[in-house]
Structure formats: structure tokens, C-alpha cells
Amino acid sequence: MSSSMAVPPYSNKAAIYLAPVISFGVVALFLVIARIYTRVKRTGQLYLDDWIIVVAEPMSLVGICLAIASTAYGWGKPAAFFTPETLKQTLRVQFALQTVWLLTLWLVRLSVACSLLRFGTERLWRWPLYFIMGLQTVISWGYFVIQFAQCTPISSNWDTGISSKCWNLDPIILLGWVIAGVYIAMDLTLSLMPIRLIRTLNRSQSEKMLIGVLMALGLLATAINCAKMTTFTSFGQGDVMQATIVPSMWAKLEEEIGIIATSLPWLKSPAENWLKKMGILKEHQLTKPSFVADMSLPTVKDNVEDMNNDDDADSAKVKGNIRVDSVATALGTKGSDSSLPKDPNSNTWQAV
């Protein structure tokens, strides 16, 4: 009896994850629907960045459903309260959740860059965006390869009772820190690029302030990424079924805030109408659609046609201000005191 492990007191931290994730998920879904409806109604067509979000949003909803299924199996309570079968099912669902999450964040970030790409033809404007899109693709698919190749057989990611061979975690953790810094730099680039467009808009100060607020919301994703980085030092520590709740929450919120931030600028006109009804904006303060005044930044033909049909087109110029995509996987390490039974040679990723 004295050698038996003490069972930790029962607790369930699932609500810490589900409450904000579901709330922001509902907002993101509503805004994407409103964005697509507004776009089709005013221009009669969708651009590449719209189609990417159309794919990314359902994938984000799939991720929420997988997280709910994981909590139904018990994710959020101590691992000591799991049966071997429920533990296996929980880890299997979380492996699927990680995979969907990686792809969704990649698509959201591509959508941001594509939306900015349409508003300039000069090299100084387009080449940094091409570079960001290419770098993001390499990073995301690099993590995708790690997801499936880190441990063999793949089933060892959720079946802790089988022997496995896994990569050393130290280089992967170091890579996570480096990529986090790269993402912050990319966030700032995407956030600051639209400032040039705002400065050259022939719009009233009130309209510019509204556009600026919409753009600034994208910086919230960067703040979330910084908050998520604070969890890096605790990789693999604590009970794996509870310790992964907070980093997983930040990771998912980063994705959802990215979707929200990419969709809000397209809703400038409805926001203006609401502000007029509230008396905050007056009719005489609103100007007609204008082209970018800086002639050194020509626009493509598609965008000119868009602005002729959509009095919101100017707001689209400021939509490149979000932080998306990073990998915050809580990795099992030798220092982990988790009560989760596992193969001593296994270094599987934990729930994110």
C-alpha cells in the first residue's frame, strides 16, 4: 500500500478551453458568413483570399468539434481518472485536432497575405508578401511532417502501451522558440503594411479611425501568440491531460482571432451604417469611395473594378494585420511528472 501512487484530487479544467474557444468560434463563423454575403452582394464574386477563408472556417469548426469530443472523453481531468481505452481515444482525437489546427492556421495566414497582395503591383509591396507566404508554407508543412514522422509507428502517438521510436525532443523545442520569433516578425510586417494605405486614403478622419480600429484588432493575435509563448517553459510538465489545456487554448484562440481579424475590415460599411444610427458618425462625414492617393502604389485592375462596385473597397486595403499560425505543442519530456502511462522511449506530442 505504501508504494502505491496517490490519486490526485478530481478536477476538470475543460471549461478553461471550451468557454473562450466556443465563444470566439461563434463570432468567427458569423463574421465569415457576413463577409462572404457582403462580398457577393456588392461585387458578385469572391477573390482568392475569400475562397481560402471559406475553406479555413469549416476546418476551424471541425477543430472545435474535435476538442469537444476530446473533453467528452475526459480531457481536462487528471490522467489517473482515465481508463486505458478512454486515454487512447482522447489522445487519438487530440492528434487529429493538432493536424487540423496546423492546416487551418496555414490557410488563415495565406488569406491575409493574398488580400494584401491585390493592392499593389510594385516589387517592394509584393515580394515581401510572396516571401511570407512561402516561408509560412514551409514552416507549416515542416510541422506537418514532424506531426506524422516524429514517432514510429504513428499509432504510438495515442497508444502509449506499444514500443516506439521517437525523435529527440530538444531540437524540436528549440525550433519552436525560433519559429515563434519568426512569427512575431511576420505579424508585425503584416500589421504595419496597411498603414501606408491608410495614410493615402481620401477619407475623413472618422473613417480612418474606424479602419484603424479594425486593423488594430489583428494585433490581438500577436498578443495571444506572446501569451502562448509563456507556456513554452512548462512543456511536458504536470499532468498531461490538464497541463495541455492552457497552451491548447492559446493556440486555438490564435487561429480564431486570425479569422476574425481577416473578416472585420470587409464589414466597414455595415459598421458605418450602425455608427450612423447611433449618431457617432454623421452623413456629411462620410466620403465616397476613393482610390489610393499615392500613385507610386498602383492597384491591379481587379481591385479597381472592386472599388467601383463596393464602397467598402478602401477598407480592404488595411486588412493585413493579423498574427496567425504557430505551433505550441506540449511535448512530453523526461522531466514530466505526468501520471500518464507511456513507453519510456516515446516522446510523443501532447494535446494541442
Image (cartoon, rainbow, N blue to C red):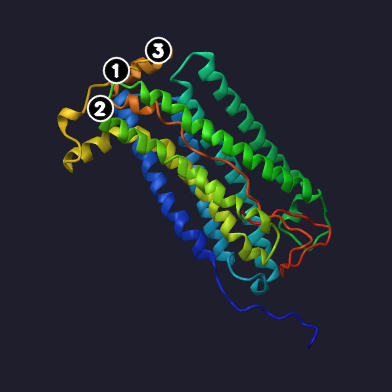
Task: Give residue 73's quadrant in the image.
Answer: bottom right
Question: Residue at coordinates 61% horizontally, 65% vertically from top-left?
Answer: 242
Location of residue 116 in the rendering, given as x and y in whole percent from the top left corner: 46, 25
Question: Residue at coordinates 40% horizontally, 29% vertically from top-left?
Answer: 318
Location of residue 295 in the rendering, given as x and y in whole percent from the top left corner: 39, 11
User: Circle 1 sits in a helix, a strand or a loop, which is it?
Assistant: helix
Q: CA distance from mark 3 to mark 1?
A: 11 Å
Could you tell whether 1 is left or right of 239 in the image?
right
Nearest to viewer (mark 2 / mark 1): 2
Location of residue 32 in the rendering, given as x and y in whole percent from the top left corner: 39, 39
Question: Residue at coordinates 25% horizontally, 27% vertically from top-left?
Answer: 204
Question: Residue at coordinates 50% horizontally, 31% vertically from top-left?
Answer: 190
Task: Please state the total of marks drawn on the protein image.
Answer: 3
On-image quarter of the N terminus: bottom right
Residue 301 is labelled as 3
Task: Give residue 69's quadrant in the image.
Answer: bottom right
- Circle 1 sits on which residue? 308
Could you tell me if residue 232 is visible in this image? yes
Q: CA distance from mark 3 to mark 2?
A: 25 Å
- Between 95 and 114, which is closer to the camera in this rendering? 114
Location of residue 263 in the rendering, given as x and y in whole percent from the top left corner: 40, 37
What amino acid type should be assigned to the residue bearing mark 2?
Ser
Is tag 2's residue or tag 1's residue first in the polypeptide sequence? 2
Could you tell me if residue 153 is visible in this image? no
Q: Residue furthest bottom?
A: 1
Q: Are marks 2 and 1 in contact (CB under 8 Å)?
A: no
What amino acid type should be assigned to the residue bearing mark 1?
Asn
Q: Relative to 36, does residue 116 appear above or below in the rendering?
A: above
- Circle 2 sits on which residue? 204
